[in-house]
Image (cartoon, rainbow, N blue to C red):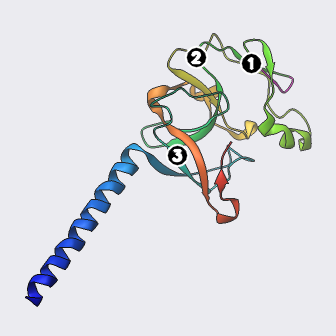
Amino acid sequence: MAETNVKSEVWGWVKAIVIAVIIALVVRTFVVTSFEVSGISMEPTAHDQERFVVNKLSYQFGEPDRFDLIVFDATETERYIKRVIGLPGDTIRFENDQLYVNDQPTDEPFLDEVQASYDGIYTSDFEYEGTVPENHVFVMGDNRGNSKDSRSIGPVHEDDIIGKVGLRFWPLTEFGFMK
């Protein structure tokens, strides 16, 4: 009788572990993933080796919004974190450190502090030729002088977007939700 109880208990643990692994795989594959920043292109918002939770479902039921932080496949082997600046149909240009979307001055409040402390032009003059294509977004790093983004790689196709950055979990001293 004791041997049956041990087998039953072991079988119960095996089932629980298998179910937990399956749930974890489903969540990781379809719901959220983690992302580690590599480099300085998103400073001051995100720093090298910080880690984030990325919501993979966010754009399955909606579209990216201007200024969302997203992770996308930049190449077959590299993923980038950048900020959405332009949406499909938008014209984008920078003139005298001012963002213009569809010829309207557009504030970038996430850069207020760094721009105020920066000596000179933070974002060089730039104009995207034409409009952002359908099913694409125009992205830029917050560290405008040191970012490989849509200014050099072009707009990002929506199929290449992994998801929206939601939560910084490392380092623990910076733990919190992202804007």
Residue, far front: 1
The percent position of residue 77, horizontal first and vertical second, equals 44, 43
* Residue at mark 1: 93
Compared across the picture, whether 145 is left or right of 117 comes to: left
Q: CA distance from mark 2 to mark 1?
A: 15 Å
How crowded is the residue under tag 3: few (<14 C-alpha within 10 Å), some, or many (20+)?
A: many
Q: Looking at the image, is mark 2 or mark 1 earlier in the sequence?
A: 2
Q: CA distance from mark 3 to mark 1?
A: 28 Å
Q: Which numbered circle lies on residue 88? A: 2
Residue 66 is one of the magenta-drawn residues: no
| Amino acid type at image mark 3 | Val
Mark in the foreground, 2 or 1: 2
The percent position of residue 174, horizontal first and vertical second, equals 69, 59
Q: Is residue 125 above or below residue 26?
A: above
Magenta stretch secondary structure, dominant: strand
Residue, far bottom: 2
| Amino acid type at image mark 1 | Arg
* Residue at mark 3: 54
Compared across the picture, whether 170 is left or right of 18 comes to: right
Q: Is residue 96 above or below residue 117?
A: above
Can you tell which quarter of the image residue 110 is in?
A: top right
Q: Looking at the image, is mark 3 or mark 1 earlier in the sequence?
A: 3
Could you tell me which residue is drawn at 51 percent across and 27 percent down?
Answer: 62
Quadrant showing the C terminus: top right
Q: Which residues are magenta?
A: 96-100
Q: Is residue 124 visible?
A: yes
Compared across the picture, whether 100 is left or right of 170 comes to: right
